[in-house]
Image (spheres, helix red, strand yellow):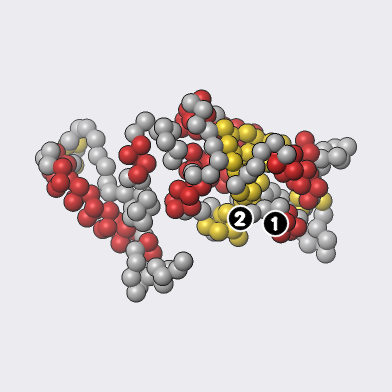
């Protein structure tokens, strides 16, 4: 998988892609994450990529020309499955979306910044808009790093124990059950006996019950049912 990230602040993403699972996946040849400075595609003397919005609204807007040049240059080298724009009013990023994106080959992520981008970019150059939450960040760089991390870790071989990714929270619309490690008792706080029993069937049943209990208590919106208005949403 190749992920090309277009940004005005590549240094905000360099640290995230240069360590841990993302770094190892790239070293193994499972993923390639390439950062592109949008200013490199500006024809302005000062490498500016933003301008004042028509209509007099406050803030600055990323211009369409450098974005179009950047995307066109990348598309001239390979085909892309998606051109993604990170925006607070995009579709909410979740685990099922990450699962689907992990099956793609080539992705462009355009990081929003300033007041946003010229809307013609969203109308004509972007195929999908993604939000990582209902809040506003300084720019889309952190969102792009989150998306890349969530997707790449799902690639076969990216993590040492592939079963670990399958048991993560949200994979089956349930929160993950509690996990424990040694010592079995600390300050009188004991690990549940079932986890020490060696009886795998009982352990799996306990984990499932705990997942349901935690989901019902902490994220009831994830569970189907008449009390959840989102359960019937497509």
**Which circle's residue, 1 or 2, is located before the other in the chain?**
1
Q: Looking at the picture, how far across and down is residue 86, in whole percent?
A: 61, 51
Please give the label number shown on residue 129: 2
Q: Seen from this angle, which residue lies furthest bottom?
A: 226
Camera-side residue of 161 and 184? 161
In percent of the image, x 26 and y 58: which residue is there? 213
Quadrant of res 158: top left
For label 2, the SS is: strand
Camera-side residue of 211 and 122? 122
Q: Looking at the picture, how far across and down is residue 168, in whole percent?
A: 35, 46
114 to the left or right of 163: right
229 to the left or right of 146: left
Camera-side residue of 31 and 178? 31
Q: Assign the N terminus to one quadrant of the image.
A: top right
49 to the left or right of 29: right
In percent of the image, x 20 and y 32: which residue is there? 183
211 to the left or right of 200: right
In percent of the image, x 33 and y 39: which residue is there? 164
Check disc 1 and report the residue beneath it: 122
| Any part of residue 163 in sight | yes
Q: Is residue 106 above or below residue 88?
A: above
User: Is mark 1 in CB contact (under 8 Å) with mark 2?
Assistant: yes
Count numbered badges in the picture.
Answer: 2
| Any part of residue 139 in sight | no
Camera-side residue of 222 and 190? 222
Q: Is residue 110 above or below residue 32?
A: below
In percent of the image, x 24 and y 35: which residue is there? 181
């Amino acid at each position: 998988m190749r992920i090309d990230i277009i940004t005005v602040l590549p240094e905000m993403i360099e640290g995230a892609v240069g360590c841990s699972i993302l770094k190892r996946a790239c070293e193994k040849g499972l993923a390639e994450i390439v950062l592109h400075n949008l200013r490199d595609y500006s024809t302005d003397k000062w490498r500016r990529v933003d301008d004042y919005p028509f209509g007099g609204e406050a803030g600055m807007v990323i211009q369409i020309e450098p974005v179009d040049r950047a995307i066109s240059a990348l598309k001239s080298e390979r085909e892309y499955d998606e051109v993604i724009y990170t925006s607070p009013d995009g579709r909410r990023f979740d685990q099922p979306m990450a699962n689907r994106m992990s099956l793609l080959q080539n992705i462009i992520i355009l990081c929003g910044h300033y007041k946003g981008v010229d809307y013609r970019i969203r109308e004509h150059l972007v195929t999908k808009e993604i939000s990582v939450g209902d809040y506003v960040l300084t720019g889309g760089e952190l969102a792009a790093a989150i998306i890349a991390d969530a997707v790449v870790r799902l690639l076969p071989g990216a993590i040492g124990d592939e079963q670990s990714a399958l048991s993560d929270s949200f994979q089956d619309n349930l929160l993950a059950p509690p996990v424990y490690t040694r010592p079995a008792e600390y300050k009188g706080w004991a690990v549940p006996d079932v986890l020490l029993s060696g009886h795998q069937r009982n352990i799996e049943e306990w984990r499932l019950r705990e997942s349901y209990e935690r989901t019902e208590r902490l994220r009831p919106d994830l569970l189907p049912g008449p009390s959840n208005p989102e359960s019937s949403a497509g």
